[in-house]
Image (cartoon, coloured by chain):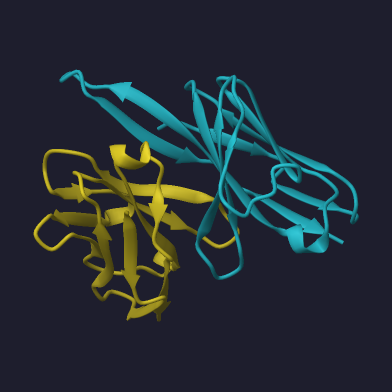
Chain colours: A cyan, B yellow
Amino acid sequence: GAVVSQHPSRVICKSGTSVKIECRSLDFQATTMFWYRQFPKKSLMLMATSNEGSKATYEQGVEKDKFLINHASLTLSTLTVTSAHPEDSSFYICSARDTKVGTSGRARETQYFGPGTRLLVL
Amino acid sequence: AQSVTQLGSHVSVSEGALVLLRCNYSSSVPPYLFWYVQYPNQGLQLLLKYTTGATLVKGINGFEAEFKKSETSFHLTKPSAHMSDAAEYFCAVSDWNSNYQLIWGAGTKLIIKP
């Protein structure tokens, strides 16, 4: 199946610094990627939808200036946590949407998830 | 609006017993339905999905799920639990109304007793 990678897998940083997380679709092109945050013992929270070549669409309550998203190519989206604070510590997961047209001509979409990045802000 | 309900935040079964994880959804148009698994300290992995066609879907690791439109359900089952199945399982739904963005259930942690 399709593969999505994330880098780094783990990062520890000091409070006030910025951290960039990369999400790559390795064997397909993804015009749309999604960034999620997972809090301990809770489900995923969609942070934003990243669209190649245009601005990301942020969910309500997510600070655009704090969580910068760039989707510069069809295989790469980046999430930058700016001026990180301890409360930003979390598991960040990206997904990429793969669209295939079946024999019936109908488009089928599947999301493939990256392995996640664990961020710890000290 | 779409929503997904997973009944039971924790489910505990004995090794070798039947696994049943429940998922009910609401969607006004034909949905795509998914089950994902997350092992400790790992990212999500697709177990199986339903888009069209056969309502009984087989996935990896011996899991299967059946789409029942009349019950708006997509329960996940496995005949015989293994210790390695201990993980958190997420049900999700998407449809064209939401531009195929996934709507997630809260997750169910599966505990396997020896």
Nearer to me, B34 or B96: B96
* As drawn, A107 above or below B81: above
Could you tell me which residue is drawn at 42 percent across and 65 percent down? B107
| The N terminus of chain B: image quadrant | bottom left
Nearer to me, B91 or B111: B91
Could you tell me which residue is drawn at 23 percent across and 73 percent down? B18
- Image position, residue A105 (x, y; %): 20, 18
> Toward which corner of the image does residue B71 lie, by quadrant?
bottom left
- Image position, residue A52 (x, y; %): 56, 23
Counting the numbered discs, the total is 0
Relative to A106, is A74 on the left or the right? right
Could you tell me which residue is drawn at 62 percent across and 55 percent down? A61
- Image position, residue B59 (x, y; %): 28, 48
| The C terminus of chain B: image quadrant | bottom left
> Toward which corner of the image does residue A73 lie, by quadrant?
top right
Nearer to me, A68 or A60: A60
* As drawn, A68 above or below A15: above
> Toward which corner of the image does residue A21 lie, by quadrant?
top right
Could you tell me which residue is drawn at 40 percent across and 62 percent down? B89
Nearer to me, B97 or A119: B97
- Image position, residue A109 (x, y; %): 34, 32
Relative to B19, is B110 on the left or the right? right
